[in-house]
Image: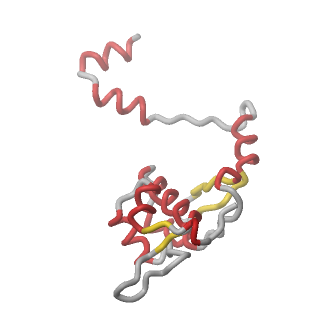
Amino acid sequence: MITQNESHAISGPKAAELANITYRQLDYWARQGWVKPSVEPGIGRPGRRIYGPADVVKLAALGHFGRSGADVGQLGQAIAGLSLTGAPDDYLLVASGTASVEVVPAGALRARVSEPGSSVVFDPAGVLSRMAGASPGRAASRRSA
């Protein structure tokens, strides 16, 4: 269960590291109000922003959606409005459309994508990166194989 207590106090730099984003991104997103530090807001000159585990999950999700090509500016407000309770492996965050993020129970989504014929997932990134790294002659021979 995600709780906000002293043992879950995470500094801004550590939150950025855990979320796999830069501190500059964290700072900008905090100033936009998309992910607010829930443990300590860091107001005032000596203040430091202290994040909780749910905040880090939101930061990581926003970073992931951005790296996936989604418009972070559109999804930021949706992330801000999420209420994340329970263990992080109990749910998945799904961006749908340009400005919508929903919390989906993990079991429901896993069951849906595991049913034959109901969903097909393909990640072309690996293929595109291999093609980008191949010489033109090698790419052509791969196509004909």
Q: Position of residue 64 (x, y in %)?
A: 47, 53
Residue at the far bottom: name it: 44
**Who is closer to the viewer here, 60 or 42?**
42
**Who is closer to the viewer here, 123 or 15?**
15
Q: Is residue 122 above or below residue 8?
A: above
Residue at the far top: name it: 145
The number of numbered badges drawn on the structure is 0
At x 35% / y 64%, what residue is drawn?
23
At x 42% / y 31%, what residue is drawn?
126
Quarter the C terminus occupies: top left
Q: Position of residue 133 (x, y in %)?
A: 28, 28
State how the image is colored: secondary structure
Q: Is residue 33 left or right of residue 91?
A: left
Q: Is residue 35 above or below residue 110?
A: below
Q: Position of residue 102 (x, y in %)?
A: 64, 61
**Who is closer to the viewer here, 73 or 17?**
17
Q: Is residue 132 above or below residue 31?
A: above
Quarter the N terminus occupies: bottom right
At x 72% / y 32%, what residue is drawn?
117
At x 38% / y 17%, what residue is drawn?
143
Q: Is residue 143 above or below residue 56?
A: above
Q: Position of residue 111 (x, y in %)?
A: 75, 41
